[in-house]
Amino acid sequence: MAIEDDLLARLRKIEALMAGAGTAGEREAAGAALQRVKARLAEQTQRDPPVELQFSMSDTWSRQLFVALCRRYGLKPYRYPRQKRTTVMVRVPRGFNDMVLWPEFMELDRALVAHLQDVTTRIIRGAVHTDTSEAEEVPAGLPGR
């Protein structure tokens, strides 16, 4: 599980950097970083009232990550009746979203997607076929169609 450990370490470092950690010791203290971000959110809420924001994510993994990140910061993601599962609503100060939540999500999502792509490619190459390249593009109207 060294690959998963590496991903977890990268995710923790991203979180610590997004929280504004200044020293290597702070970067390693993910718990302290989380407390700083929560404090920043509480402070921001005093100056910048929460607004309702709508996010749309068709990728299940990204949506799950975003919802978990919101919950980590004490935000309550939700959907209204008849909204698609791809929709996530959250009430958050716009400044916190723009400076912390969304940039952190984007960094974490990039790391997660890259990891999932690597794992998927490795499994397909090992269990199905070594060539995992995209299908070739051919001109329309080939004989035999």
Image (tube, grey):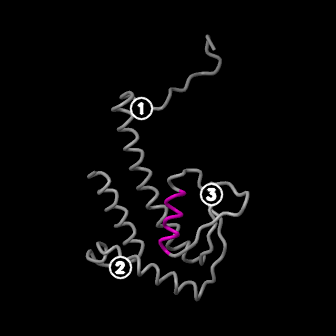
User: In terms of image quadrants, where is residue 88?
Assistant: bottom right
Horizontally, residue 135 falls left or right of residue 91, namely: left
Q: Position of residue 87 (x, y in %)?
A: 64, 58
Horizontally, residue 54 falls left or right of residue 133, namely: right
Nearer the camera: disc 1 or disc 2: 2
Q: Earlier in the sequence, mark 1 or mark 2?
A: 2
Seen at 35% across and 76% down, the residue is 31
Q: Position of residue 105 (x, y in %)?
A: 49, 64
Identify residue for label 1: 132
* C-alpha distance separating marks 1 and 2: 42 Å
Q: Which mark is residue 56?
A: 3
- Front in this rendered view, residue 127 or 40: 127
Q: Residues within 10 Å of mark 3 (few under 14, many from 20)?
A: few
* C-alpha distance separating marks 3 and 2: 30 Å
User: In terms of image quadrants, where is residue 80?
Assistant: bottom right
Residue type at mark 1: give it.
Answer: Thr
Magenta span includes 77: no
Q: Which mark is residue 74?
A: none
Residue type at mark 3: give it.
Answer: Ser
Seen at 29% across and 72% down, the residue is 28
Seen at 54% across and 76% down, the residue is 96
Residue stretch in magenta: 63-73
| Image marks 1 and 3: residues in contact by CB distance under 8 Å | no
- Front in this rendered view, residue 118 or 64: 64
Residue type at mark 2: give it.
Answer: Ala
